[in-house]
Amino acid sequence: MNANTVKLIWRELSSLDNVPCPFNIKLTGPAFIENNQRIDLLDFANTLLEFHKALDKTYCILTNQQRISPSNRKQYQLITKSITKGSLLLDNEIIFNSAQLVLPIVGIINPQTIWEYTSAGFKFLKTVYELFSKEKKAPQYVINNPVNCNFITGDNNLINSTDNIVTVGDPRILDIAAKSRPHYGAITKSLNANNIEGFQAGFKRDTTSEIALDFNDRGMFKQRSIVDKNPLQFHAKIIDFNTEKRTGKLKIFDLATSSFSHDYNFSIIGDQDIIPYIEALKHPMVSITALSENILDPVHGLRPLKYQLIDIEQKMVS
């Protein structure tokens, strides 16, 4: 097969893959009723902008880029074709203005895959945070990476969950979820019962990949912390201590690497004497008993946010 034949095949394949992906965005609430003549522009403009940013994150991850360049923006666009008031209903399209050849490891990216992976990232986020809220522990993740996952089209089953176990069809969905979480969090903040109360994005005749939030979802994606009930014992260096607030910072010593980790905040539980903590500032390392206060990381599960110190050993570790 010569080079000209390859180019011809690629051109024909790309023309099929670059068919625009139409979808609707619908905002509902008192702001859009027919007799309401006043709509706060920022309310719905920021909501639409945050969703645009979420789609942009999918594009960057699927094309292995850190950010969208001006040339990318000319090629990949979200366009609005019509706007209907009553609710605010927008008919949109994800379009590629020219054929795009990407690395084989990334696969063929087209408007439809941008939507499917954005939807999968949202479904993963909502599933994980709902399970975390219910079970008070991080779900287990199972990566089920099929041979053709880089070429998925028309597959709405990228995420499944049963009994606190979330099966993910493609590891890139984790990155999409993590990077789009702040944008969906911002959308939920814009929703309230008095103005904009609902956000929906998807297809009129197919709701399986719909992205939907309402004012009851406010705060869903906030990084809430949970305190582990099982005390931990570790060696650490106290690097800062505020005697009035009874809080400070420490570095945990990692036995595996024989080095200190990054800084963690800590607070003292109860009415402990603060003298040992003051004296600890003079020592290279001390022994600590503490409770770990963790937050949910969509990619890595629970990770420490800070520590609540139960005790510090009087005998300093050399």
Image (spheres, rainbow, N blue to C red):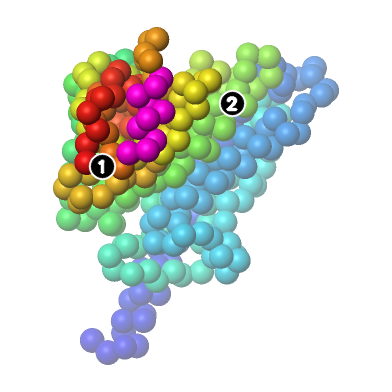
- Magenta range: 274-283
Q: Which residue is mark 2?
A: 189
Point 50% across, 34% down: residue = 184
Is residue 27 shown to the viewer in this render? yes
Residue 13: x, y in percent?
A: 36, 68
Q: Give residue 38's mark.
A: none
Q: Which residue is mark 1?
A: 253
- As shown in the figure, which amino acid type bears the numbered disc 1? Phe
* Mark closest to the chain's N terminus, 1 or 2: 2
Relative to residue 79, is residue 23 depicted above or below?
Answer: above
- As shown in the figure, which amino acid type bears the numbered disc 2? Lys
Point 62% across, 18% down: residue = 192
Residue 45: x, y in percent?
A: 69, 37
130 horizontally vs 77: left or right: left
Examine the structure image and report whether residue 309 is included in the region drawn in magenta. Answer: no
| The C terminus - image quarter | top left
Looking at the rendered structure, the secondary structure element under dot 2 is: helix
